[in-house]
Amino acid sequence: MRLLHTMFRVTDLEKSLHFYTEIMGMKLLRTNKNEEYRYTLAFLGYGNETDSTVIELTHNWDTNQYDLGTGYGHIAIEVEDVYSSCDKLRAAGAKITREPGPVLGGTTEIAFVEDPDGYKIELIASKAAGKGLEG
C-alpha cells in the first residue's frame, strides 16, 4: 500500500492552479472534467503519480465557499532551506502565516504558507524532514 493523494475542494480552480504550479513549483499532471455532474479534478505534484504522492484539487462548479473545519490541519512539503523558501514564496505573492524558525519545543525548522482557499502548508527543512521535533 502507499499514500496516493490528498484532496482539497477549491473555489477558484485557475487561482489554485496558479498557486500550486507557479508559486509552489508543482506540475499539473492531469485534469478530468465532468460536465454532467459539474466538477473538475486537477492532480498536481512534484513527481509522477505512479511513484509520488500528489494533490487532487476538486472544483465543484456551483460552489463558491467551503468551511475548512477544525479537524483538518495541513500538508507538509520538504524544502532545502525554510528561510530562503519563504523569501521566494513571499516575493511571488504567497501569504506566509508562520515565519520560519524552530518548532515550539524542538529544533526542526518550519514555516507555514496559505493557499488561496486558506489551506495551510507546512514547510519543513529537509535536514529534519521525517525526524520529528528534534530534527
Image (cartoon, rainbow, N blue to C red):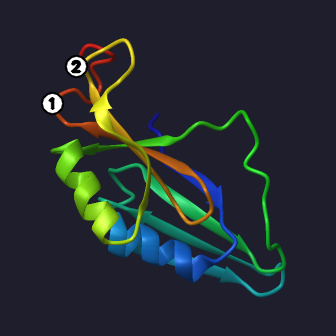
Asked if one can make out residue 96 in the rendered structure from this viewpoint, the answer is yes
Q: Mark 2 touching mark 1, by CB under 8 A?
A: yes
Q: Is 10 above or below relative to 78?
A: below
112 vs 17: above or below: above
Say which quarter of the image contains residue 18: bottom left
Figure quadrant of residue 28: bottom left
- Mark 2: few/some/many CA within 10 Å (<14, 14-19, 20+): some
Residue 27 placement (x, y as % from top left) = 34, 71
Residue pictured at 22% horizontal, 19% vertical? 135
In three-dimensional space, the C-alpha distance between marks 2 and 1, rounded to whole angstroms, equals 7 Å
Front one among 81 and 95: 95
What's the amino acid at mark 1?
Answer: Lys
The label on residue 73 is none
Q: Name the residue that disc number 1 marks.
A: 127
Amino acid, disc 2: Gly
Question: Is label 1 in a helix, a strand or a loop?
Answer: loop
Crowd around label 1: few <14 · some 14–19 · many ≥20 (10 Å): some
Left or right: where 119 falls relative to 96? right
Nearest to the observer: residue 111 or residue 6: 111
Give me the disc on residue 135: 2
Residue at 22 percent of width and 36 percent of height: 125
Residue situated in front as seen by the camera: 36 or 24: 24
